[in-house]
Amino acid sequence: AALGTKSTTTKKKKKKSDKKKKKKSSDSDDDNDKDNDDHLPTPSSSINALAQATPAFFFFLGENRSKIERVLSRKHRIFNRLPKGMERNQLVAQEAALWWIDLHPDEMRRYMNS
């Protein structure tokens, strides 16, 4: 019986020493992770960055909104039934973003210099 208890105590000691080693290595890993996390965007900052439009895109949208709505009314049957509001504006903004991406750089500069 004494041998049985002896082996369990040595196992416990080994487990404790393993935990200490893991803590030391994880602490250094945590330090490395902290260094790497400094340049990563936080979720809230990336959400805010995506939600904001640039002034040039805003001017483009203002100038082309009627054309975009006309195209959307032909493309999406649901678009005509949507009340004015968030869903309708989201569809218009998505379509405008697609148009914006396809613009020639000279056209983009025209809106940026407005």
Image (cartoon, helix red, strand yellow):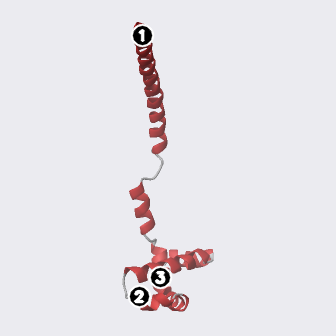
Mark 3 and mark 1: span between their CA atoms?
75 Å
Tell me if residue 24 comes above or below residue 39 in the rendering. above
The picture places residue 31, in percent across and down from the top left corner, at: 45, 34
In front here: 20 or 10?
10
Quadrant of res 85: bottom left
Mark 2 crowdedness (10 Å alpha carbons): few <14, some 14-19, many ≥20: few
Residue lying at 43% horizontally and 12% vertically, measured from the top left: 4
Which amino acid lies under the numbered mark 1 shown in the image of this protein? Answer: Lys
Q: Secondary structure at mark 2?
A: loop
The picture places residue 95, in percent across and down from the top left corner, at: 52, 80
The picture places residue 41, in percent across and down from the top left corner, at: 45, 53
Circles 3 and 2 in contact, beta carbons < 8 Å: no
Mark 3 and mark 2: span between their CA atoms?
12 Å
Q: Circle 1 is placed at which residue position? A: 6
Which amino acid lies under the numbered mark 3 shown in the image of this protein? Answer: Val
In front here: 51 or 62?
51
Kindly give the residue lying farthest to the right in the view shown: 104
Tell me if residue 81 comes above or below residue 57 in the rendering. below
Residue lying at 44% horizontally and 19% vertically, measured from the top left: 17
Mark 1 and mark 2: span between their CA atoms?
76 Å
- The mark nearer the N terminus, 3 or 1, is 1
- The mark nearer the N terminus, 3 or 2, is 2
Q: Circle 2 is placed at which residue position? A: 82
Asked if residue 56 lies left or right of residue 101, the reply is left
Which amino acid lies under the numbered mark 2 shown in the image of this protein? Answer: Leu
Residue lying at 37% horizontally and 88% vertically, measured from the top left: 83
Asked if residue 111 lies left or right of residue 8, the reply is right
